[in-house]
Image (spheres, helix red, strand yellow):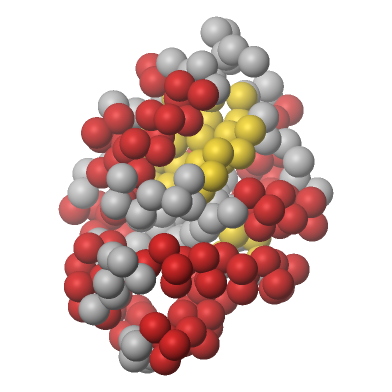
Amino acid sequence: MTNDKVKTIIFDFDGTIADTFPLILELFDEYAEEFGYKKIDRKESERLRNKNPKEIFQELKISPLKLPFLANKIRNGLNKQIQTVKIFPGMKDVLLSLKKKNFYLGILTSNSLDNVRKFLFIYNLEVFNFVHSEMNIFGKDKALNNMLRQNKLSREDVIYIGDEVRDIEACKKAKIKIIAVTWGFNKKEILQKNNPDYLIDKPEELLKIIIRSGF
């Protein structure tokens, strides 16, 4: 399906729609010993929220070779407990409002398609035109470009919504506008330093920005 007339809004999943961070931390600690890593203290986890992915992996000494296997374990763990994951307050109303306004909605995620679809079913949120899943921690711009190509989208008609520094970096490389949100993984301070097109603290601000910006 092409999208010649309708503007497209792409959402990150973890940390933007779904509050998976607490469960991901639990799962990391569960598998830490198996992969030779130390568990993450909760105070330490707050400090890590002000770092980019490369800094986090360096500090935790996570091997790039082990990362895909660890990520797969965590995704499988999420799958078994996805019913415990909460949606961020206000996000459901925003998504339903955008759908009513006939926006073309998508999700780009490094989580699994099964996890995302289960979550959307639980919250009766089957409003998305597509979900693109691609495990690419350090190359999200490549995932963005793959998503654009596969769904025949024009980057000028797309705005992305995400919660991490890597989302901002990827959108700049892919030449896509981004709204960074402060309720996810990375804190407001580090998001601001990376200069997203927009920075918001509440889901309801999305509607104002999207409409005001011509979306």
* Quadrant in the picture for the N terminus: top right
Quadrant assignment, res 125: top right
Let me know if residue 97 appears in the view.
no
> Height in image: 117 above or below 87?
above
Q: Position of residue 48 (x, y in %)?
A: 29, 75
Quadrant assignment, res 128: top right
The residue positioned 42% from the left and 91% from the top of the image is: 33
Let me know if residue 30 appears in the view.
yes
Q: Position of residue 179 (x, y in %)?
A: 40, 40
Count how many numbered circles sit on residues in the image. 0
Judging depth in this view, the residue of 197 and 1 nearest the camera is 1
Left or right, 58 with respect to 167, comes to: left
Judging depth in this view, the residue of 190 and 58 nearest the camera is 58
Left or right, 53 with respect to 160, comes to: left
> Height in image: 77 above or below 18?
below
Judging depth in this view, the residue of 2 and 77 nearest the camera is 77
Q: Position of residue 197 (x, y in %)?
A: 30, 36
Q: Position of residue 78 (x, y in %)?
A: 62, 69
The residue positioned 63% from the left and 33% from the top of the image is: 130
As drawn, the residue found furthest toward the front would be 65
The residue positioned 35% from the left and 44% from the top of the image is: 140
> Height in image: 59 above or below 65?
below
The residue positioned 58% from the left and 34% from the top of the image is: 106
Judging depth in this view, the residue of 139 and 158 nearest the camera is 139
Left or right, 162 with respect to 187, comes to: right
